[in-house]
Image (cartoon, rainbow, N blue to C red):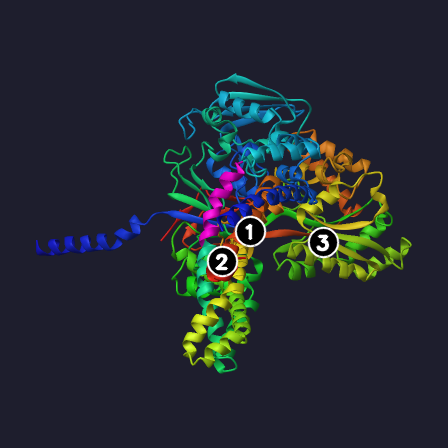
Amino acid sequence: MLQYFLRRCISIIPVLLVVSILVFLFVHLLPGDPARIVAGPDADEATIRQVRIELGLDKSFPEQYLTYMGRLFRGDLGKSLRSKLPVAQEIALRYPPTLYLAAASMAWSILFGVFFGAYAAMHRGKWQDYTAMVVAVSGISMPQFWLGLLLIQLFAVHLGWFPVTGFTGKWKELVLPSLTLGATVAAIIARFTLSSFLDVLQEEYINTARAKGLLERVVMWKHAFRNALIPVVTMVGLQFGFLLGGSVVVETVFAWPGLGRYMIESVSVRDYPVLQALLLLYSFQFVVINLLVDMLYAVINPEIRYK
Amino acid sequence: MKTRHWMLVLLAILLISTAPLFAQGKDIIYASDSTTNTLDPHNTSDTYSGAIERAICQGLLGFDKNLNIIPLLAESYSYNETATEYTFKLRKGITFHDGAPFNAKAVKVNIDRLRTGKYVRSSLMAPVKELQIIDDYTVKFILKEPFGAFLNALAHPGALMLSPAALEKYGDDVRIHPVGTGPFIFSEWVSGSYVLIKKNPNYWRGKVKVDSIKFVPVPENGSRVAMLRAGQAHYIYPMPAELLKLVENDPKIEVIKQPSIIERYLILNTKSKPLSDERVRQAINYALDKQAIINIAWGGAATPADSVFPSSLPFYKKQGPWPYDVAKAKALMKEAGYENGFKVVFLTPNATARLRATEMAMQQLKAIGITGEIQSMDVASFYDKLSKNKKETVGETPFIAFGGWSSSTGDADWATRPLLSTEAFPPNMSNYGFFQDPNVDRLIKAGLTSADPKVRAKAYAELQDYVWSKAPWGYLFVDTLIAAKSKNLKGIYPMPDGAFTVEEAELVQ
């Protein structure tokens, strides 16, 4: 088990190396000249040339790549072209808000998603099932910006219970954005739980359990639930990976000082170092989460441990 | 005796009950769609950051609400007839927020910093040959050649004065530690969240009436309006035109509309056939229903263009608007030999309003046979594409692109030279349609080489008369800026260039 874990950890390094090359290429191949953007819409060529030199963009492509990799190995992510502040510092500032938002949304959605999914499965074909799934499908189909603005209108403008936007570290500020972000994920999880449950309920060991005369409650929770959970855990892990990237829509609607908004701002001004750092961070998060998900399988299903 | 006792009690009750009103902090929240990029004025290229810097720092000259030049840290100024020497008498007794004195040396430190050529706004001081310190409170700029718009360069946010002590202490990190002489002192900048400035208790122009202003970036239109309605922002900009109905009936909210210096137009590739034909370009102008585009694509927040540059700029002379007359447009097309129309490529940034405006223009031009594909892209790719066109080859592809311009110096020169002169061909400046006319070059030069307002007015009047009929662009409209604020906030105004002024901000009950 430990050996497996260590082997997986080491395998992260080559993955990230390949990713870093791809990220560099991808970012630099975007059309648009950062020097022109930094210099402003009305700059003359002399100013743009000067800015290009200041930003180190006058150097050849391979030269820029080597500088970037050299810095990366020393743990230096470079400076933002736009604000000239160290990228690591900027990301450190925006990481916690995104993390809190992701965690809060995930908590909501697991709670609601798994409950609704399991509930619907147990009442297959009855009104409870239909109601739960109508709610879930609505959750998936509702555009986040629309739901966000609706919640703002009701709970912030009319009732005044929560602040409209921003995040300064208070829990009240987390409620509306995490509900908005969680709605979609909860719905996805609910759908997933339902189908996974239904699959499991057709397995022979469930029939066996029932035939043994076990209580339906025991069959459901002891035999079906744990097994049904495995694909759900994969799904949850994947969704959490996405949430950790910061939701562009929710962070924009709620003026959330997180990574999603930072990403979109940086794309529009072609802030190469920031984009590279963020994409690298996203990949790293995904790899780590995948690893954790695999470890979780082993916890849920002992059989996986021995393979 | 007894009555007096009662009156005292009453007075006490009154005082206690109103106490919260007096104790209430006068802290203002300004929500905007923009994000602060830097607070180093010499290295700022965006209007929003520049406007915040203006609350902290001041220049020798500045603009009033209507974009007229006013002396600020300079008490008075004079210049010679040929616009090559400008002398400034500085105001005495002013100190920067860190206690450093403002004097001729401080001016020199700032101008020298700009003149190193390393900063985005270095170009403002490019005409300067030498800066002389005449005495402690007099400086003289000697220019390389006549430059009639030099006063505007000094009123530009790029020429704001930073404390020499702060420049020494922080170097280029002054971008996160700006120190000036303005009404507000920089307090805190949490990247991505807000910029906070606090009142300068020793402001030289008088008492500052609010305690602090917090600038918050809120990119989503609906959320910004919700903040204002929920009382969590005092001022929002821009106020989205499509949501005006929502706030117009709110008794606590006031909408401010301000004509801007932002002009929108269709860039016509004048090097390519058939757009090289003046009659075709005039036909395009007749075929455009400006008002319809304003109403539908721009939410009504604009007025049809009536000259080459907007009326809020100096030396403006009214020409139009260009009448909407499809019959006349068709006649001109026929005269030019394009009765059956022709094909072009339409280019536009993909921001909703601009895309919509371009699509509407396309539809209107179809009526005179001009058809083509639309290529929309994000704004960085758009300008990248336009600036990569070469004089020699651009003639091969006739294109019509959605353009816009704001003269950041607030001067007529910067509204014409970068767009219409031969020297402004890409990549040098922004003459993306490669419009070339010796008469235009001559008039632009005439306006630039004199500091005498009369001479300049004459040159720019002639220039506008001439360029208007030459139709290098499909003239569209001038933006109207819309802001909204809570009624108890006074003294914050949007400026015609899209910036704002907060010096006179005040919260009334």
Q: Kindly check if marks 3 and 2 are in contact, taking CB atoms under 8 A apart as contact.
A: no
Mark number for residue B376? 3
* Residue at x-position 47% and y-position 43%: A93
Could you give the CA–CA distance between mark 1 and mark 3, rounded to whole angstroms? 33 Å
Residue type at mark 3: give it: Ser
Report which residue position mark 1 lands on: A286
Nearest-to-viewer mark from 1 and 3: 1
Nearest-to-viewer mark from 3 and 2: 2
Q: Secondary structure at mark 3?
A: strand
Residue range corresponding to the magenta coloring:
A85-100
Mark number for residue A298? 2
- Using the image, name the chain to which the residue with label 2 belongs: A
* Residue at x-position 8% and y-position 53%: B1
Q: Nearer the viewer, residue B449 or B29?
A: B29
Is disc 2 on the same chain as disc 3?
Answer: no
Q: Nearer the viewer, residue A212 or B357?
A: A212
- Using the image, name the chain to which the residue with label 3 belongs: B
Residue type at mark 2: give it: Ala
Residue type at mark 1: give it: Phe
